[in-house]
Amino acid sequence: MKISKKKSDIYLSDIENFNIEDILECGQCFRFHKLGDKKYVIIAHKRELTITQTDEFIIFHDTAKKDFENIWFDYFDLNTDYKKISSILSENDSVLKEAINFAKGTRILRQEPFECLISFIISQNNRIPMIKTVVNNISEKFGEKIENYYTFPSIEELKNATVEELNECKTGFRSGYIRDAVSKISAGELSLCDIEKLSYADLKTELMKIKGVGEKVSDCVALFAYAKLDAFPIDVWVKRITEHFYFDGKDTAKDKIEVFAKEKFGEYSGYAQQYLFHYARMKQIGK
DNA sequence: TTCCAGGACCCTG
DNA sequence: CAGGGTCATGGA
């Protein structure tokens, strides 16, 4: 990977397995807007990052080198060798091979824990376009305006949000769950910072103390905010595609699928899950 | 109109 | 303890 600075922009080159479209459209994060072909603006870390990708470069517009090193390098998981991981997962598994080939440039983002937690609470029994709408509504109502967009609110900014105000953001029956998460965190019953050092299993146990956070939501937060790569979130799509390809199309309990994934994908479960999820959803597999 | 979505809660038996 | 009805919301 090569990094160069041109005027106020950062240029990345010689990087494999990076496709901004795959990364953003695969359903792991919700606060971005498409500006054009392979051109997006992402709102994270109190910044609006405009990013474009050409055949040769990935361009981080108007970005200080310090911000690239301190924020975006980790956010885009640039220290991980996805070529190696995709090659290991493709080996002896034609399903993964196909799913990876479909979206080679997918990477697991390292998202901010609070935003990730609230976003995936909202995700339950919901659709991705609607999740994006609701998360944006919350940002516009409780966050701060940067330039053209609003930040996702901090814990402090969401602390006094009432169920009625949340309902106005279309959170529906999840408003009480968000209230419970915010109150437990602001009361110090749960520290999103302290749990970072916990194992995957212990981290899940802590997150699941929040009302409205179960197996799947805690798995997503573990994977997308804390980089617990042994997590394998099982939603309707992952259930469908694993049943379709690995269980002869038969209805299979989630705990059985979990055991299967751990055995087959091991320390790379999180990556495998994301390739499978995106492929299944795009191809409507099992539906 | 009915069904369903990156589920989890809670009541019933 | 397992199973399934129920929960807002909006698009297909």
Image (cartoon, coloured by chain):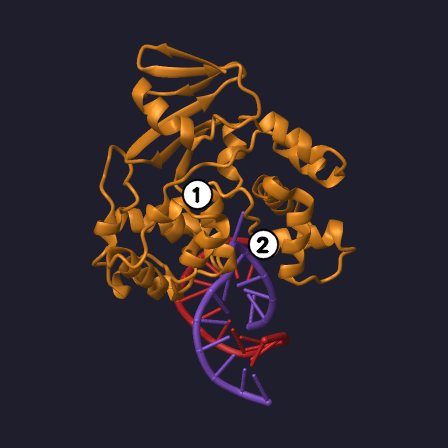
Chain colours: A orange, B purple, C red
* Towards the viewer: A225 or A30: A225
The amino acid on which the numbered mark 1 sits, given as a three-letter code, is Tyr
Q: Chain of mark 1?
A: A
The amino acid on which the numbered mark 2 sits, given as a three-letter code, is Ile
Location of residue A199 in the rendering, given as x and y in whole percent from the top left corner: 47, 48
Could you classify mark 2 by the number of other residues whose Cα lies within 10 Å: few (under 14), some (14-19), or many (20 or more)?
A: many
Name the secondary structure under disc 1: loop
Q: Which residue is mark 2?
A: A234
Query: Is A92 on the left or on the right of A123, as rendered?
Result: right
Location of residue A176 in the rendering, given as x and y in whole percent from the top left corner: 34, 66
Q: Which residue is at a point 53% across and 19% down the rendered structure image?
A: A15
Query: Is A82 on the left or on the right of A121, as rendered?
Result: right
Location of residue A83 in the rendering, given as x and y in whole percent from the top left corner: 61, 25
Query: Is A246 on the left or on the right of A209, as rendered?
Result: right
Kindly tell me whether residue A114 is visible in this rendering.
Answer: no
Q: Chain of mark 2?
A: A
Kindly tell me whether residue A232 is visible in this rendering.
Answer: yes
Q: Which residue is at a point 32% across and 18% down the rendered structure image?
A: A65
The quadrant of the rendering that contains the C terminus of chain A is bottom right
Name the secondary structure under disc 2: loop
Q: Which residue is mark 1?
A: A226
Could you classify mark 1 by the number of other residues whose Cα lies within 10 Å: few (under 14), some (14-19), or many (20 or more)?
A: many
* Towards the viewer: A143 or A137: A143
A257 in relation to A154, above or below: below
Q: Which residue is at a point 42% across and 15% down the rendered structure image?
A: A11
Query: Is A204 on the left or on the right of A102, as rendered?
Result: left
Location of residue A229 in the rendering, given as x and y in whole percent from the top left corner: 53, 42
